[in-house]
Amino acid sequence: MVEWIAVNTSWMYWTWQSLLAIGGLFAAITFMGVWDGISPSVPRKGFLPVKTTRGDRFFIGIISLIAVFLIWLGIAGDTALWIPLAISLAWFAAEGRWG
Amino acid sequence: MIPALAILSISAFIPLMTVINYSLHYIFAGSAPTFVGFDNYIEVLRDPAFQGALIRQLFFSMGILAVEVPLGICIALSMPRRGPAVALCLVLLGIPLLIPFNVVGIIARVLTQSSVGLIPEFLALFNYDFNVSKYPVDAFATIFLLDVWHWTPLVALLCYAGLQAIPDAFYQAARIDGASSWKMFRYVTLPKLRSVLIIGVLLRFMDSFKIYAEPLLLTGGGPGDATTFLSLHVARKAESYQLGYAGASSFIYLFIVIVFSYVFFQLMTNIGKGENQ
């Protein structure tokens, strides 16, 4: 099965890096869905200017992560990528907790 | 649920993932792909042609929203609420919406052709040398007006449907309270139109951000790169088999559309709710 998928999706040029990133994202979305099913999120008002649910904050976190990386790549190139990673993860955590 | 997931996979997941995977490779004219990490993104973000197309696109889309939304509201407000004229107005408004993008581009091309077009001939009466293949302002303005003509009726129809759904009791109450026409519009009509305006703004923003056929047919992106919008820029790169670059720019393009749409949605659903006070 795995081999069949690998052969028939080779035109998509999967790499372990992209598989890891997308697999992680889908796992996180699935986890959020299950979590929301078990314990539905209540919209709340944090430091963000609008009321947000867990899903909203997760979405904003992902969008922020991509934005930070794009800005970094545009300015500094692909050197020291741990810096945008640290910034975006710190923002992700802060926004998820207090946003 | 499985059929829905299968359809979603084919229509969204597979194309999106392919584009993202392509954006991480150097792929040129059928040669073996080489994994290059973020190199394509760096190239795109530092490319003056991409930056120019993005600025042009944002300017165009914001301008479109600034013109089409108020104009659509005005048209909807001035339409009759009942009677035989309603059907006539709806048909007239619907006509531009029925014309395909490529036909609109060809009509505009015929109308603006420098030697035989109606518009250059008319403007020549006022000593204005109108030429879309020579002057960037003429080309940009023509595409802008073309979009306004083509898509303002959509906003007007949405607003008209919204207006029809507002019960008269609201206006009667406002009149009893002595509200002026402006105050009735500001505090009754506009808040009641919120949901249709959200749809209208989002649809028009996303559609205007994808404008492709009109500039391609009318000017081919010129003169120079005056009407090379993002979609045209990306398509040219893909046509020239720079699939890695095209993939990276497509992803950035999608990202910008998502961010702006989310911001517009949040702004429009929260304006006037007093959450920020």
Image (cartoon, rainbow, N blue to C red):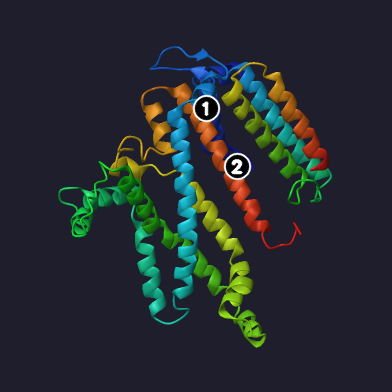
Asked whether, in this view, residue B133 is left or right of residue A25, the answer is: left
Q: Is residue B106 left or right of residue B55?
A: left
SS at circle 2: helix
Check disc 2 and report the residue beneath it: B259
Q: Measuring 43% from the left and 32% from the top, which residue is drawn there?
A: B234
| Residue that protrudes farthest toward the bottom in the picture | B176
Q: Position of residue B132 (x, y in %)?
A: 27, 45
Which subunit holds the residue at mark 2?
B
Name the side, left or right, on which A4 lies relative to B274: left
For the point 49% across and 63% down, the residue is B70
The residue positioned farthest toward the front in the image shown: B127
Query: Is tag 1's residue or tag 2's residue first in the polypeptide sequence?
Result: 1
Query: What amino acid is found at the position of numbered circle 1 in the picture?
Result: Leu
Look at the image and tell me in which quarter the N terminus of chain A lies: top right
Q: Which residue is mark 1?
A: B45
Q: Are marks 1 and 2 on the same chain?
A: yes
Instruction: Please determine whether, in this image, residue B40 is positioned above or below residue B61.
Output: above
Q: Position of residue B194 (x, y in %)?
A: 61, 63
Q: Position of residue B69 (x, y in %)?
A: 49, 60
Badge 1 element: helix
- In the rendered image, the residue lying farthest to the left is B115
Disc 1 residue crowd, few under 14, some 14–19, many 20+, Cα 10 Å: many
Chain letter of mark 1 equals B
Say which quadrant the C terminus of chain A sits in: top right
- Which is closer to the viewer, label 1 or label 2? 1
Three-letter amino acid code at disc 2?
Answer: Val
Q: Count of labels shown?
A: 2
